[in-house]
Image: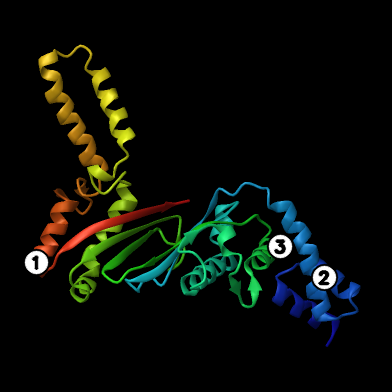
Amino acid sequence: MSSMELIKQLRESTGSGIVDCKKALSENNNDLDAAVKWLREKGILKAQKKQDRATNEGVISFFNQDNLNSFAVCKINCETDFVAKNYDFLIFAESLTKHINENQNIKNAGGFDDLSSLLIDGKDIKSVLTDLISKIGENIQIISYKKYNSNNSIFVSYLHNKYNSNCSKIGAVVEIQTDNLETTSNIIEELKVIPMQVSAMRPMGIDENSINQKILNDEKDIILKQMENTPEDKRDQILKGKLSKFIKENTLLGQGLITDPKKTVNDYIIEISKNNKIELKISSMDLYII
């Protein structure tokens, strides 16, 4: 094999530059395997220098979202939006989330440290990440992941302004309990507006009981301070009305439906349940944002 063919093969297999490939082959007597190892060793040094740099961009990656009972979500950060849209970065995000979804030996939720036993194409996750950092040239961090599984619920997901079929900067997952999985699965398109609602309106909780009490107490204090000049006999009524409005605007079930603001999300759930003769209940929601 000619030196140019060796350089081309090394570039294709490692993604390294021409100069680096030439030097790697020269240092290792044109031995491809040794050259790959040499580049990786040099790449590790480069990657280590980059691992302290800030990562404010990235993607939310979903895998197996067509399976309504089991799928995974992973949040992966990088330095720039340009890399977040990079083909190699997106392929890595999809592969990682796929392996998380299929691995039964890791926790259902966690961060990078919880993935130490995960192997991708026979390599540990730290080595895979280091190789990617060396190839792309930016710091990349696995921030968090979560696996979704249930036998009596469906998970309805949504990715906003997708980079590809699995990745975006904003994603939402809503768990809907049901007494009829088959019927509920058949009306999934009607239910997709719910995670869209979470993504667009970013509610603080599903209902009043799921909002942090401190938030409600702080809001109450703010309203009372705004009513310092209001007659005492009217304060309770005004406080109740303003607090009720705050709760309605900041809870998923209380918000006006984004596709039909005349009805609330709760009205919509009741309507779908009645029309399909099933019982539906939103039991959890997660919003992921880069």
Residue type pointed to by label 2? Trp
Q: Callout 2: few (<14), some (14-19), or many (20+) C-alpha neighbours within 10 Å?
A: some
Q: As drawn, is 112 to the left or to the right of 283? A: right
Rendered image quadrant of residue 34? bottom right
Q: Callout 1: few (<14), some (14-19), or many (20+) C-alpha neighbours within 10 Å?
A: few
Query: Taking the image as drawn, is residue 74 in sight?
Result: no
Residue indicated by mark 1: 275
Residue indicated by mark 3: 134
Question: Which of 154/64 is in front?
Answer: 154
**Quadrant where the N terminus lies?**
bottom right
Badge 2 element: helix
Residue type pointed to by label 3? Ser
Residue indicated by mark 2: 38
Residue at the spot 46% in from the left edge and 66% down from the top edge? 164
Badge 3 element: helix
Q: Callout 3: few (<14), some (14-19), or many (20+) C-alpha neighbours within 10 Å?
A: many
The percent position of residue 264, horizontal first and vertical second, equals: 16, 49
Query: Taking the image as drawn, is residue 29 in sight?
Result: yes
Q: As drawn, is 146 to the left or to the right of 152? A: right
How far apart, in angstroms, are the residues tagged by discs 1 and 3?
55 Å
